[in-house]
Image (spheres, helix red, strand yellow):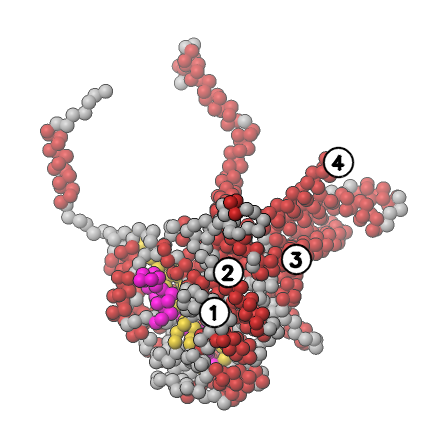
């Protein structure tokens, strides 16, 4: 075997080539900042995805990033399956949109967004308590609250039917363009209105199933009575007076809901409103938007407003989406840069307009965009949808229990099941004992 | 290579024997069979065996998925053994009311649906068998429609028929002066609805299998029975059923497994409600694991189907083997 020797001439040639390569100018190519793959929620408002594509691709062109966007629907829980699969495989998108509880469920696998959240809060104002509860684990921000998909599930009422059967002028309580005058909109008023509308044959269309719309409403009602099944420390509080009081009230009012409410899913209330069979539902403006297309005479009578106040305050269900960066993402700086771009006021305004007011930003300075004031008919119907005057506390069912316990209470529909069991004649103490046993199971780690 | 073949040199001979051995290996029927089955083996390994073992692994983890869910305080085992068994999730499930509800419902759903599917399939197969050959194909095709439509899609049509507020069935009932039926709102009606849809989807499978079995029963047996004076019922009992026993057993086994593991019908029609009264193992596992974020518990629930179905399979297949040996 011939031995390789390094001659002086060869050494000099190699050194010259290396030096030339290192000192040559960096040519910035079309995708010099690498690749980024993101998964966004597939919006059900037609055309809304186009707005996010435009904002994200404009950012990609500016930053020279090769960007791939996948729109993942929540129908059939495809987004939850994607999240679970990517978490198990530790591979997939760099950034993924996760609904409500999922950032907490995968907190250990998510990149901290403290740096960009500090910057965004300074720019657009503080985020509400529910976003902090769901989006932060200790001091770590698990992601950025997404405008796209975030929603409030407050009441959407029929102006004419409430006035005619319950004597409530909902537009006077929630005037377009100014602060609510809704002191009289209490749990008692809600109960009386529910009874009157039931008698008139146009019952409130509130579900008692275990899908999110039903659970969110039950959660807000329980919170209005200060009732929680588990407190913030993780202690069981099922057999408390507040829970008894809330359950009793919910059963009392449930008697005036449609008889098949325990079998309702998230589409049932929408159909209830659009078909003209009910005076009120609890939903974001998607039901109104469908009515605008399919039954304009009903849409023209719809008014989105705040929740009734209970003994412990006025609580409205808020379900935020988050944009989260996986810790296994190979291009975290680019993902963070994109999240900042998607959270700029201009981008947010574009998303809100594209979704016809459905999407709600979580930052306090961004809840008074013109879209909500201008949408109609009737004009101003969505003015109070984003809670512009902060007259109600935005919350999520099962809070303030530690999120991993609350997620179980929420997904199993424990609150609505309690209401239905008691409604169907089970004694309250037995219902509470059942709930306590269920929740004990959720406490396991 | 030509030089090597002509040469008488011993090492060169070794060179030419090697390709022959390889060729012979690849020409063996078993090798060809294996290679042809290899894509399927890879698919089964990737999509069935690996996920099954992974599910077993997941079911041994705690909710946080960071450590093993060891058993605790077993009533029937000393602590020394109990605390080293990684079946804490299974132990937990045994203490849950909903779990036992799901066990009951899964058994009720599978047994009732399979019995009625078999019965309906048997009756339909006889009807179709007795239709003249000319028009039989048309009827066979039409009766197979419920089975060939993806159940998730056909169940959507059933959902509209049974919708809580806008049921088409109720529209007809109320039009005829009857009360509305809470098809998905009442536990018993909801169970009835999911079983009904399962029977509607699955009966054609039984029909086609039984029809094939009926066609293979020799006519001479019926002729002999007729000469002996057997009536219609005796011909069914003493000729048809004994000749179809194996196909009935295999079809029932196959259908029991598929029905027990059903997901789409319940998911679309009732989503397990009301009050968890229609959940099956698969739908409850999805609810816990994917919707509830407790993947280990969801995996544990789904694994409960395995021993139950394995026991059913062992009994039925043993019976078939025994009868095969007797024959």
User: Do pointers 2 and 4 mark residues of a single chain?
Assistant: no
User: Subunit of mark 2?
Assistant: A
The answer to whether the residue labelled 4 contacts the one labelled 3, judged by CB atoms less than 8 Å apart, is no
Residue B128 covered by magenta stretch: no
Q: CA distance from mark 3 to mark 2?
A: 26 Å
Label 1 environment density (alpha carbons within 10 Å; few <14, some 14–19, many ≥20): some
Q: CA distance from mark 3 to mark 1?
A: 36 Å
Secondary element at image label 2 = helix
Q: Earlier in the sequence, mark 1 or mark 2?
A: 1
User: Do pointers 4 and 3 mark residues of a single chain?
Assistant: yes
**Comparing labels 2 and 4, the label whose residue is closer to the camera:** 2
Which label is found at residue A441?
2
Residue beneath the point at 35% across and 67% down: A132
Q: Write down the residue under mark 1.
A: A237
Q: Write down the residue under mark 4.
A: B326
Q: CA distance from mark 4 to mark 1?
A: 65 Å
Question: Is residue A429 left or right of A335 when viewed as pictured?
Answer: right
């Amino acid at each position: 075997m011939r031995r390789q020797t390094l001659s002086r001439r060869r050494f000099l040639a190699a050194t010259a080539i290396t030096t030339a390569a290192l000192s040559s100018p960096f040519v910035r190519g079309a995708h010099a900042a690498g690749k980024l793959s993101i998964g966004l929620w597939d919006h059900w408002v037609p055309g809304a995805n186009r707005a996010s594509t435009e904002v994200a691709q404009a950012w990609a062109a500016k930053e020279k990033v090769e960007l791939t966007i996948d729109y993942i629907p929540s129908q059939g829980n495809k987004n939850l399956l994607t999240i679970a699969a990517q978490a198990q495989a530790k591979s997939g998108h760099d950034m993924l949109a996760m609904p409500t509880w999922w950032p907490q469920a995968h907190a250990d696998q998510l990149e901290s967004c403290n740096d960009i959240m500090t910057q965004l809060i300074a720019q657009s104002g503080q985020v509400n308590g529910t976003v902090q509860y769901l989006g932060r684990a200790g001091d770590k921000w698990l992601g950025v609250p997404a405008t796209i998909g975030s929603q409030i599930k407050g009441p959407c009422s029929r102006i004419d039917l409430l006035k005619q059967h319950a004597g409530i002028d909902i537009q006077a309580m929630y005037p377009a363009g100014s602060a609510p005058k809704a002191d009289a909109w209490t749990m008692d008023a809600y109960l009386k209105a529910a009874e009157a509308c039931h008698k008139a044959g146009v019952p409130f269309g509130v579900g008692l199933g275990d899908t999110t719309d039903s659970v969110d409403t039950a959660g807000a009602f329980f919170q209005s009575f200060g009732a929680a099944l588990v407190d913030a420390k993780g202690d069981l509080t099922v057999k408390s007076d507040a829970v008894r009081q809330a359950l009793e009230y919910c059963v009392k009012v449930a008697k005036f809901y449609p008889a098949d409410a325990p079998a309702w899913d998230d589409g049932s209330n929408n159909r209830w409103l659009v078909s003209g069979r009910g005076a009120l539902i609890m939903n974001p403006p998607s039901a109104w938007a469908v009515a605008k297309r399919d039954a304009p005479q009903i849409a023209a009578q719809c008014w989105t407003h705040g929740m009734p106040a209970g003994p412990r305050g006025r609580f409205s269900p808020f379900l935020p989406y988050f944009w989260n960066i996986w810790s296994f993402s190979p291009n975290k700086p680019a993902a963070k840069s994109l999240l900042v771009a998607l959270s700029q006021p201009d981008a947010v305004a574009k998303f809100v307009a594209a979704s016809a007011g459905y999407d709600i930003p979580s930052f306090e300075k961004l809840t008074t965009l013109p879209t909500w004031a201008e949408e109609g008919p009737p004009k101003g119907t969505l003015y109070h949808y984003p809670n512009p005057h902060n007259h109600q506390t935005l919350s999520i069912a099962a809070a303030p229990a530690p999120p991993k316990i609350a997620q179980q209470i929420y997904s199993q529909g424990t609150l609505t099941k309690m209401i239905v069991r008691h409604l169907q004649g089970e004694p309250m103490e037995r219902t509470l004992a059942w709930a306590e046993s269920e929740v004990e199971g959720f406490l396991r780690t | 290579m030509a030089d090597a073949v002509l040469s008488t040199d011993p090492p060169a001979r070794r060179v030419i024997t090697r390709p022959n051995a390889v060729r012979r290996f690849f020409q063996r029927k078993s090798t060809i069979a294996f290679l042809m089955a290899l894509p399927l083996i890879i698919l089964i390994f990737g999509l069935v065996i690996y996920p099954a073992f992974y599910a077993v692994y997941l079911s041994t983890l705690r909710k946080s998925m960071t450590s093993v869910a060891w058993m605790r305080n077993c009533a029937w085992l000393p602590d020394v053994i109990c605390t080293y068994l990684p079946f804490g999730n299974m132990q937990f499930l045994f203490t849950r009311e909903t779990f036992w509800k799901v066990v009951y419902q899964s058994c009720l759903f599978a047994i009732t649906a399979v019995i009625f599917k078999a019965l309906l399939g048997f009756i339909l197969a006889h009807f179709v068998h007795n239709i003249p050959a000319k028009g039989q194909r048309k009827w066979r095709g039409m009766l197979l429609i419920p089975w060939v439509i993806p159940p998730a899609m056909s169940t959507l049509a059933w959902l509209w028929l049974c919708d809580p507020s806008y049921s088409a069935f109720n529209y007809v009932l109320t039009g005829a002066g009857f009360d509305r039926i809470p098809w998905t709102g009442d536990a018993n009606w909801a169970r009835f609805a999911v079983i009904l849809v399962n029977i509607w989807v699955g009966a054609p499978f039984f029909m086609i299998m039984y029809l094939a079995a009926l066609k293979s029963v020799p006519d001479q047996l019926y002729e002999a029975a007729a000469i002996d004076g057997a009536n219609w019922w005796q011909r069914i009992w003493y000729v048809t059923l004994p000749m179809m026993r194996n196909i009935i057993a295999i079809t029932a086994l196959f259908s029991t497994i598929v029905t027990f593991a059903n997901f789409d019908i319940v998911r679309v029609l009732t989503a397990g409600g009301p009050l968890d009264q229609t959940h099956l193992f698969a739908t409850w596992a999805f609810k816990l694991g994917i919707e509830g974020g407790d993947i280990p518990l969801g995996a544990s629930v789904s694994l409960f189907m395995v021993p139950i179905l394995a026991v059913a399979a062992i009994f039925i297949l043993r019976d078939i083997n025994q009868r095969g040996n007797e024959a």
